[in-house]
Image: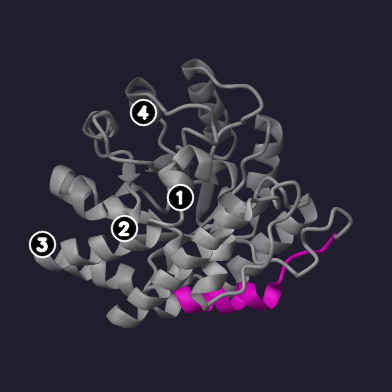
Amino acid sequence: MSLKFTAQDVSGIYNIIPTPATQNASSHDAMDTINYEETVKLVNMLIENGVDAILTNGTFGEGATLTEEEHFNFARKVIETVKGRVPVFIGATTLNTRDTIRRAKAFMSMKATGLFLGRPMWCECDDDTIVGYYQDIAEAIPEAPIIVYDNPEAFKGKLSTSVYAKLAQIPNIIASKYIGIGPQYLADIEACGDNIRILPMDADWHEAKKMAGAKAPACWTGSGNCGMAPLSALKKAIESNDDAFAQEITKDIRFTYQTLFPQGSFKIFSLYNIPLEKARMSAAGLVNAGPARPPYHHIPEEYLTGAKEAGRRWAEIQRKYS
């Protein structure tokens, strides 16, 4: 079965959204905790301001803490709101292959463009387990394009270059959300060939484009939820080869992130990813992301202060580039 969306269709700004929460969402006995009004508002804001694709239910999208009913209802609301205006990749990761396939089939029946998939995280997966997991899902849902979620903290390790080479042979896998562009980046690009587009973070996109050229046609971000203007400006600067302007925007984006990562540590950030990101987004002023759902709602106050400052800084550059 041929895919309706392939690696060659991947370009621009791929924004991952939170799952906006009601004010009681941190309570263990709260049930329907989705703020549907904020969800609709956020999705429309992103599309009206130039986002190229929407991804849901990764880490700060709280794919791990929604009830199954909430997960389905949220996916349905996002897809209904998008109305086909941009591609939508719904996160379906669970602790096992069978539940992931079951949820993924449901999301595809709702007319999702494709899936946003990490891997089971109870036990660390070796290379054969990782490849087998994605092969099983591709076999079960051959019509579903897949964006891989490659996060070394969330999934207990970085995908190896040899794994990328094997994933590139699975037709469903079209892209990967990628952390950092260190020494392995170009090797992974080469291993993926034209079959998988590796998506750097927004703050790394300009550098990735200079390193990989046409093999870096898109970035991932969660900052579109704070305002699309800097990202749209960066996209335009990159596409027009305006190196100086792209560098200026990248510098501004990195400035906003300085206070988001406690002690400058991605490892510590990953312990509190959900409340940090939701506080940042709410502080930027364009969406009320609401509180984090249990058990991930506990966070040192000084870390929360840094996240809110990151949101305020993004609001400043949002005004600058609007």
Q: Is residue 304 above or below residue 85?
A: above
Choose the circle earlier in sequence order: 2 or 1.
2
For this view, does 160 lie left or right of residue 143?
left
Q: Is residue 321 visible in this depiction of the protein?
A: yes
Choose the circle earlier in sequence order: 4 or 2.
4
Report crowding for label 2: few under 14, some 14 to 19, many 20 or more residues within 10 A (C-alpha). some
Front residue of 199 and 268:
268
Q: Which residue is mark 3?
A: 243
Residue 130: x %, y % from top left: 51, 24
Q: Are marks 2 and 3 in contact (CB under 8 Å)?
A: no
Choose the circle earlier in sequence order: 4 or 1.
4
Front residue of 73 and 232:
232
Residue 261 is marked as: 1
Q: Is residue 145 above or below residue 69?
A: above
Give yes or no for residue 172 being in the magenta stretch: no
Q: Are marks 2 and 1 in contact (CB under 8 Å)?
A: no
Name the residue rendered at 58%, 79% in the picture: 41
What residue span does the magenta drawing correspond to?
Answer: 31-46
Q: Which residue is mark 2?
A: 254
Q: Which residue is mark 4?
A: 164
Q: Is residue 4 above or below residue 226?
A: above
Amino acid type, callout 2:
Arg
Residue 164: x %, y % from top left: 36, 28
For this view, does 116 lie left or right of residue 99?
left
Residue 59: x %, y % from top left: 58, 48
Which secondary structure is most common in the magenta stretch?
helix
For this view, does 234 lie left or right of residue 57?
left
Q: Secondary structure at mark 1?
A: loop
Q: Secondary structure at mark 3?
A: helix
